[in-house]
Image: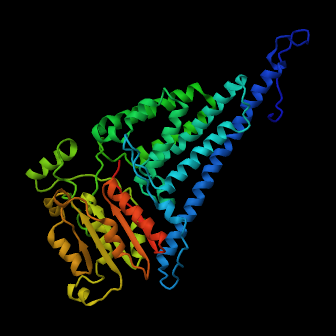
Amino acid sequence: MSWPETRGTVRATDEGGVLPDDPGEDPRFRKLVEGILFGRRFVLTYNVALLGVLVVFTAWHWGEKFTLRRKRRDARRKEGEDEGFDELQYQPKPIPIINKTLPTNAISLFVLTYIGLNIFYNFYNMPMDIQYVFVFADRCGLIFSANLPILYLLAAKNQPIKFLTGYSYESLNIFHRRVGELMCLGTFLSYEAIYFTSLGSFRQRMYEIFLITHILLQNARPDFLWFHYHTSRPYVGISLAIFLIDRLVYRLWLKSTSHPATLTSDDDEHAWFSLLIRAQATSGFTRTLLDYARTHRQTRIRLDGPYGSSHALDVLSSSDTAIVVAGGSGIAVAYPLLYALLQPLSRDLETALSKKSTKKVKLMWIVHSASHREWLPHDKIKELQDWGLEILIPMPTEVAGRPDVPLSLGKWADDSGETGVVVSGPDTLVRDVRNTCAGLIAQGEDVRVQVEKFGW
């Protein structure tokens, strides 16, 4: 195994001879130099490969978006057309002992492909000999540097990938974490502080520490990399540009504190905080906001967002049967979608009620306590029902346990047309809905499922 020939340099004496110990004449040294130079040329194609993947997903998203908007009701899928698709939609059980929630098989397959791509670029044309360990280390450093821009891009709240692919910030954040974990393998010591503070259990308990640690370390590490490893400078520069554009251009007008939240609204005139300020507001900003709301009728705030996408609404709008499954505060996601689907073109209620729609719109709202039903006012529910919503609110889980979600979804799925399903709630509920839809697809049903999750 050999690399392309590379011209070496020799150090000559005053008499024109070559020093006996000149490393340029040592074949082993020349091979090391050739290996390093080859690696630096080869890694340039890594970004081209990632760009190709982005182009594929962009074309897929916009092609699907165009198809959904056409609403072709006469071209039905034949039974068994998506036999392999159901396996990709399936979400495995959490990992035992550590109770780690796994994504769908499709996401896991994509992550494994990404890891395989990195392994390929680290080991391609790399001799398995101890004398080339420096060349291997240099290659690993190059791959690490090449991954920096994509790591920063996926972490940015305002990013083009969200627009190009239709994936929400929370969905893309899954890949951001996987990229970060892979990079931790290459820089085991320097990035472990970032990794352990980014674990889901740590973020939920000490979000402020996670945020501060990430901001400080994500700025310190590229600085050291810039001065220590000159070859990485183009990648570090791109990463820095992404960070500055996201933080300065889009967030310069915001205050220094950041508090992730989910708001819901039924029109362009107002939004509710009532679905955000909940009984579990025991500490932090949410508790402060709750105390403030109890003593003040109004206040002025600044908002940055949204970070979601319209794909969920597109899926529901293009379906003959639209099903929304909400668990607890997931109703904050469900209500605006239902309102957008059912809101009459006319503001005149009598005119709206006289119009019959062939679309079936259904909601399953699972709550832990009966008091949680007050999060969505009764008059709002009644309004949606008057417009044609079919709603199912099972007994609270603290009384009757978890409802049979697969049974209800199976009854609601329309075997004579498209069924769009959107779910928002706890991980266990999301997994049940995903796997139920995967089973329906395997049976020949035309089902699309979209998950909307809370995240930061």
Q: In which quarter of the image is the N terminus?
A: top right
- Residue 24: x and y in percent read 81, 20
- Residue 10: x and y in percent read 83, 19
Judge from the rendering whether residue 198 lies leftward or rightward of residue 153; answer left or right. left
Image quadrant where residue 2 sits: top right
Residue occupying image coordinates x 16% and y 59%: 399
Report the number of numbered marks.
0
Image quadrant where residue 389 sits: bottom left
Residue occupying image coordinates x 26% and y 77%: 390
Q: Which of 199 and 56 is in front in this view?
A: 199
Judging from the image, the colouring scheme is rainbow
Judge from the rendering whether residue 440 lies leftward or rightward of residue 370; answer left or right. right
Residue occupying image coordinates x 56% and y 60%: 57
Image quadrant where residue 167 sits: bottom left
Indicate whether 83 appears above or below 12.
below
Q: Residue 240, can we see it?
A: no
- Residue 279: x and y in percent read 15, 51
Q: Residue 153, can we see it?
A: yes
- Residue 287: x and y in percent read 17, 45
Residue occupying image coordinates x 45% and y 43%: 177
